[in-house]
């Protein structure tokens, strides 16, 4: 702790710690309101299908049934979360219109007096679906003739005219010619669940003054409020969003899935409406981390310097892209790793498939890059006969180096963390690495790099 | 059949925040009659302790005790705009906004105190524990709590501050990818030790030992919490978790925690870390974001340790016992 600081640097107790460990912290789902209704969703049982008809008549006869909502009830039904910051096109349907694009996609919202009645009514809705061919693999989705997932005619998100987020520095093909070794790898990562203890949910409450208070466990109150205003075509002043301690986020609660439809249901019924995911919905319907397939090709000199790196990555966005295009950009900015590589080419694709949609998750595009690149570094070490520490020290970036996305490195401390880790585990580093620093190379601390 | 041990390393960078659409956070602060300071925000605490560290930053800048700070957040009627809690941005962005608001509030506080003490604002200093003093004259001091009360009842003044922080929007060049997507970068190096049971394919992680450089620790215990939690999450990602066990096949997708596997307490390895502090140029008190990155380096470190133990490369996550056994079988059945 710095001597001139009094509070920053102290491990003061968490202000909410006692509430957490004694079970007194209130989460969204702990709230209840008089007359509160429950919303449950009719979901697609198929991965890809045309909707020919919806028959609500049996559902409407279930005791406790209050109201059903379909796409026709949603004022602005097709939206995109990042439309707030100018991302296009609008692509996701609050409730499905003519087509469902993944198993579990929301089609009809049922509002009922009790959760049990809502679930029973959901089970009584008759869907007339015509199954369509589906695609589940990122590269198959890009082949000619693949089933088209989106409503605009291809399976990639377009980045300002390109089907992928590109980064280009130097000339990789020429550098591959000059390299002593080419080291290639292909890395696959599975989609995973955020697995929060508290599932995604909200309660929308009509107030006497004509406004709606929405209690939600979102990670981003204004994302939710602003998107809800757009989807429901109401002024933002009509909405009051209240969050609180979130029972685990990890990126899974940045989407805006539950608030708009719950608020619409509250408007239509003039009663509080609760919409909270079951664990099965959390796992099978809410966003996951994307599956990634990452191809890495490195050109390496005999002494272990990486002179060229080409990365081609495919993130499986599922049926809707949500925050995933952003992850591709973040991935592209980090897909060369914390190393100084003069020639880099990165193509990062956001691909639509008929899977459960994916979105933000902890590490957002970087976690998968770090996995692929750090395994790749060990393969390079083995190829050139160096140890894993050496290969990282000699390639580590320094302050003032140029990253592939043309930002100068600042605040670099990779070398210092490697030194500290080596010390911690008792691994003896050679002097040249012990004395190396992340300072700019012209400062005379280049650690033996030629 | 044997139990094979191996060690693997990984070194990573991680960006703080992202700003491709502009990345703002705002804060308001006002003093109550008793000298508490209410910090109004709309940022959400995800359980990582945001309210605590923001309270510490506010207390530090205002020069009051941590206990005098009230964090009022996650209400769009009272809290000014915040982009959201993600991208390892919250401590950096909200912290900077709170420093700006607290600096303005402190100036208002000093102006009232200067009037009361009949001194110039520039001649006042705080002791960091709730008192304002006239420099060089220790007998002339006043409790901040008294000034806060006088501001209300004697001087009719506000002690309040507004703060905003925004990383401006950076457009990406679509041809070259030139962009400025983050504020700073934190770094880590992890060493993992594993034991692979060649009969069952089960990987036991024995230890995950790391060094992190995080700029400045606002609350070291919470940093340790992130590192331990992230090590668990990374290990889980490396060895257990999947919603599509046979991607791209869509079968066997889990519905609950009996089907979605994660390591339990008995599987937890020894987790140790060293934390270095090399303050960033633009973070509040030099902070860098550490929220997300702690799950990253354990994954390749474990994958590299498994290779070191077995001589077989596993490049598909998660590295399940089934994959380990198939990989070992392939190695035994001859060169591929």
Image (cartoon, coloured by chain):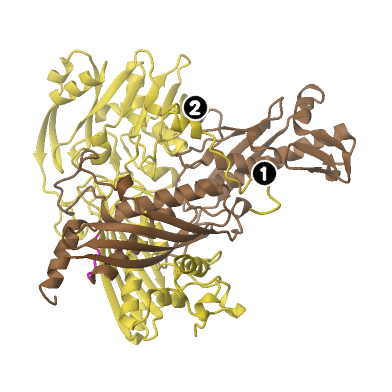
Chain colours: A yellow, B brown
**Is residue A321 among what the camera can see?**
no
Q: Residue at x 41, y 30 (%)?
A: A216
Camera-nearest residue between A203 and B261: B261
Secondary structure of the residue carrying numbered label 2: helix
Q: What label sits on residue A174 in the rendered view?
A: none
Which chain's residue wears label 2?
A
Which chain's residue wears label 1?
B
Name the image quarter holding residue A92.
top left
Question: Residue tagged by mark 1?
Answer: B60
Give percent across and percent down for residue A325: 35, 53
Q: Residues within 10 Å of mark 1 (few under 14, many from 20)?
A: many
Give percent across and percent down for residue A388: 38, 74
Q: Which label lies toward us, 1 or 2?
A: 1
Give percent across and percent down for residue A319: 24, 46
**Is residue A337 among what the camera can see?**
yes
Camera-nearest residue between A260 and A233: A260
Distance of label 1 from label 2 (alpha carbons)? 35 Å
Residue B314, magenta (yes or no) = yes
Residue B131, magenta (yes or no) = no
Q: Which stretch did the figure color magenta?
A: B312-316
Secondary structure of the residue carrying numbered label 1: helix
Name the image quarter holding residue A250.
top left
Question: Residue tagged by mark 2?
Answer: A237
Q: Is residue A68 above or below residue A94?
A: above
Q: Residues within 10 Å of mark 2 (few under 14, many from 20)?
A: few
Magenta region's main secondary structure?
A: loop
């Amino acid at each position: 702790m710095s001597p001139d600081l009094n509070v920053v640097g102290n491990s003061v107790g968490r202000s909410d710690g006692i509430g957490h460990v004694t079970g007194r912290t209130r989460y969204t789902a702990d709230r209840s309101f008089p007359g509160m209704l429950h919303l449950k969703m009719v979901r697609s049982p198929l991965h890809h299908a045309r909707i020919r008809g919806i028959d609500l008549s049996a559902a409407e006869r279930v005791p406790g049934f209050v109201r059903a909502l379909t796409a026709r009830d949603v004022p602005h039904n097709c939206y995109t979360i990042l439309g707030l910051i100018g991302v296009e096109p609008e692509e996701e349907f609050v409730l499905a219109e003519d087509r469902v694009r993944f198993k579990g996609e929301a089609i009809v919202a049922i509002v009922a007096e009790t959760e049990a009645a809502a679930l029973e009514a959901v089970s009584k809705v008759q869907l007339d679906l015509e199954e369509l061919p589906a695609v589940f693999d990122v590269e198959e989705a890009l082949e000619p003739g693949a089933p088209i997932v989106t409503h605009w005619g291809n399976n990639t998100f377009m980045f300002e005219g390109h089907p992928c987020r590109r980064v280009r520095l130097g000339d990789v093909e020429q550098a591959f010619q000059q390299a002593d070794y080419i080291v290639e790898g292909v890395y696959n990562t599975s989609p995973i669940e955020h697995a929060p203890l508290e599932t995604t949910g909200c309660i929308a409450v009509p107030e006497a003054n004509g406004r709606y208070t929405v209690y939600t466990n979102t990670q981003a109150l204004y994302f939710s409020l602003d998107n809800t205003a757009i989807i429901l075509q109401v002024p933002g002043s009509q909405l009051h969003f209240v969050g609180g301690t979130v029972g685990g986020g990890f990126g899974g609660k940045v989407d805006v899935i539950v608030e708009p439809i719950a608020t619409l249901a509250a408007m239509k019924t003039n009663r509080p409406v609760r919409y909270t995911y079951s664990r099965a919905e959390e796992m099978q319907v809410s966003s996951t981390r994307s599956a990634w397939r990452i191809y890495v090709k490195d050109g390496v000199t005999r002494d272990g310097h990486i002179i060229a790196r080409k990365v081609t990555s495919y993130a499986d966005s599922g049926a809707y892209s949500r925050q995933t295009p952003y992850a591709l950009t973040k991935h592209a900015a980090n897909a060369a790793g914390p190393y100084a590589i003069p020639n880099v080419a990165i193509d990062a694709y956001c691909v639509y498939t008929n899977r459960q949609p994916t979105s933000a998750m902890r590490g957002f595009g970087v976690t998968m890059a770090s996995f692929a690149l750090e395994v790749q570094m060990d393969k390079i070490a083995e190829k050139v006969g160096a140890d894993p520490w050496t290969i990282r020290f000699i390639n580590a970036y320094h302050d003032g180096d140029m990253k592939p996305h043309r930002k100068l490195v600042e605040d670099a401390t990779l070398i210092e963390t490697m030194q500290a880790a080596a010390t911690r585990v008792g691994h003896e580093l050679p002097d040249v690495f012990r004395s190396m620093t992340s300072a700019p190379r012209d400062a005379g601390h280049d650690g033996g790099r030629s | 059949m044997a139990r094979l041990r191996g060690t693997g390393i990984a070194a990573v960078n991680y960006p703080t925040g992202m700003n491709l659409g502009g990345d703002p956070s705002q804060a308001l602060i006002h003093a109550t009659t008793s000298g508490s300071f209410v910090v109004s925000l709309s940022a959400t605490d995800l359980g990582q302790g945001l309210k605590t560290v923001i309270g510490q930053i506010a207390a530090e800048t205002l020069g009051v005790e941590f206990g005098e700070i009230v964090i009022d957040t996650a209400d769009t009627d009272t809290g000014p705009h915040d982009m959201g809690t993600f991208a390892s941005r919250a401590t950096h962005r909200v912290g900077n906004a709170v420093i700006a608001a607290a600096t303005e509030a402190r100036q208002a506080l000093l102006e009232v105190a200067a009037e009361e003490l009949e001194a110039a604002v520039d001649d006042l200093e705080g002791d960091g524990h709730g008192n304002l003093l006239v420099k060089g004259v220790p007998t002339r001091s006043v409790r901040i709590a008294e000034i806060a009360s006088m501001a209300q009842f004697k001087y009719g003044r506000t002690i309040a501050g507004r703060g905003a922080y925004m990383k401006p929007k950076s457009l990406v060049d679509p041809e070259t990818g030139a962009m400025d997507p983050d504020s700073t970068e934190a770094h880590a190096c992890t060493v993992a030790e594993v034991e692979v049971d060649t009969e069952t394919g089960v990987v036991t992680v024995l230890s995950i030992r790391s060094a992190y450089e995080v700029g400045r620790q606002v609350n070291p215990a919470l940093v340790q919490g992130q590192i331990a939690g992230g090590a668990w999450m990374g290990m889980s990602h490396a060895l257990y978790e999947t919603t599509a066990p046979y991607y791209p096949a869509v079968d066997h997708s889990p519905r609950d925690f009996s089907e979605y596997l994660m390591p339990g307490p008995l599987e937890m390895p020894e987790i140790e870390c060293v934390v270095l502090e090399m303050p960033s140029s633009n973070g509040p008190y030099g902070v860098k974001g550490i929220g997300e990155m702690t799950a990253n380096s354990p994954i390749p470190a474990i994958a590299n340790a498994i290779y070191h133990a077995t001589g077989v490369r596993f490049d598909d996550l998660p590295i399940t016992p089934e994959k380990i056994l198939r990989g070992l079988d392939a190695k035994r059945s001859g060169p591929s």
